[in-house]
Image (spheres, rainbow, N blue to C red):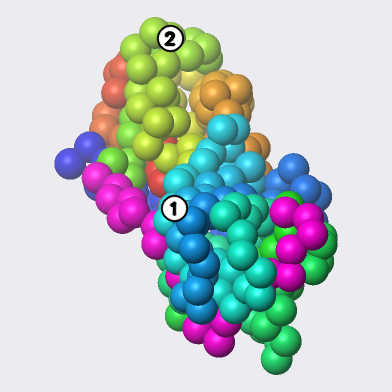
């Protein structure tokens, strides 16, 4: 019940900004999702090889990686091979599960690799595309008409979408109890496609403009901690609320710890 009023306010803010606050995926390599996959097979037929890969998401946070299975990689190869490797950037993802699916060449040519050649492929069930480049030289490697299939394990999220980080009177730093909450947020949401909103609040003691500044410092302290824990800064937003609205309604000039807080709302 404590969060009902605050979440209603937060929902209104998120609705107004939903169109403009999608996670930015810049053209810079360090902020671009990419995959690497490797297959091994004793004998290779038209069905291609099976193997494993890793989806890396530096656009979300540090050390964000998900393993997956791949089938049909190298279908149509004309020479025997026991090992093949390819890497490349990914575009069009809005959640980790989007990687799963059947992929085909985006153009009529299904030949993938000749030496260090490459090809663009698209997931047939969504808008995810990838530009793969051979890391295995000297191979006339290609995808057959069926393309390839990527299987990503189900990513079940049972974590809360809202949290409260409380502060002492006139305090703006993150204490030990608060760090435990923020560590929980980091574990649950650092490597997922979600924005994190931080709404700073105060109790009713003091002047309104002073409380706005105080709530801004509190939300900034929480943001600094989350960014320091590895979450990409462009995913974390702050908004100073001051004493209006209060998390728990009180009379003026009342000290109440539950009102001295930052409300954390996760927006998927």
What is the quadrant of the C terminus in the image?
A: bottom left
Disc marking residue 175: 2
Please say whether residue 78 is one of the residues in the magenta stretch. Answer: no
Foreground disc of the pair 1, 2: 1
Position of residue 80 measured from the top left corner of the image (x, y, whole percent) = 61, 65
| Secondary structure found at label 1 | strand
Q: Which residues are magenta?
A: 136-158
* Spot occupied by residue 252 in the image (x, y as percentages of width and height): 35, 26
Q: Residue at x 44, y 31 (%)?
A: 186
Coordinates of residue 222 in the picture (x, y in percent) = 52, 25
- Please identify the residue farthest to the bottom as the structure is shown: 108
Residue 100 position by quadrant: bottom left
| Total marks placed | 2
In the image shown, does 6 or 83 lie closer to the viewer? 83
Q: Residue furthest left?
A: 1
* Residue at the (55%, 87%) spot, across then down: 145
> What residue sits 59% from the left and 78% below the top?
76
Q: Find numbered disc 2 in the image and state the secondary structure of the residue it sits on.
A: loop
**Residue closest to the eye, 164 or 196:** 196
**Residue 238, which numbered label?**
none
Q: Which mark is residue 68?
A: 1
Q: Quadrant of residue 234?
A: top right
Quadrant the N terminus occupies: top left
142 falls in the magenta region? yes
């Amino acid at each position: 019940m404590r969060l009902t009023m605050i979440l209603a306010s937060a929902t209104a803010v998120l609705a107004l900004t939903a169109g403009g606050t999608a996670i930015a995926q810049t053209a810079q390599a360090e902020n671009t999702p990419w995959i690497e996959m490797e297959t091994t097979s004793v004998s290779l037929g038209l069905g291609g090889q099976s193997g494993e890969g890793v989806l890396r998401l530096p656009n979300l946070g540090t050390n964000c990686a998900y393993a997956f299975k791949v089938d049909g990689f190298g279908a149509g190869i004309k020479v025997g091979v026991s090992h093949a490797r390819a890497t490349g950037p990914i575009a069009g993802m809005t959640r980790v599960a989007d990687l799963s699916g059947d992929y085909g060449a985006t153009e009529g040519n299904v030949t993938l690799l000749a030496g260090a050649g490459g090809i663009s492929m698209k997931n047939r069930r969504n808008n995810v595309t990838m530009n793969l480049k051979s890391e295995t030289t000297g191979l006339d490697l290609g995808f057959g008409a069926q393309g390839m299939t990527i299987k990503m394990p189900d990513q079940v999220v049972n974590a809360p979408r809202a949290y409260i980080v409380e502060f002492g009177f006139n305090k703006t730093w993150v204490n030990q109890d608060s760090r435990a909450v923020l560590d929980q947020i980091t574990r649950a949401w650092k490597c997922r496609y979600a924005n994190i909103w931080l709404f700073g609040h105060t109790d009713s003691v003091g002047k309104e403009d002073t409380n706005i500044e105080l709530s801004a410092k509190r939300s900034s302290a929480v943001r600094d901690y989350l960014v320091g824990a590895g979450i990409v800064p462009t995913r974390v937003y702050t908004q100073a609320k001051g004493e209006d609205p209060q998390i728990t309604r009180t009379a003026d000039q009342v000290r109440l710890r539950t009102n001295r807080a930052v409300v954390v709302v996760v927006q998927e």
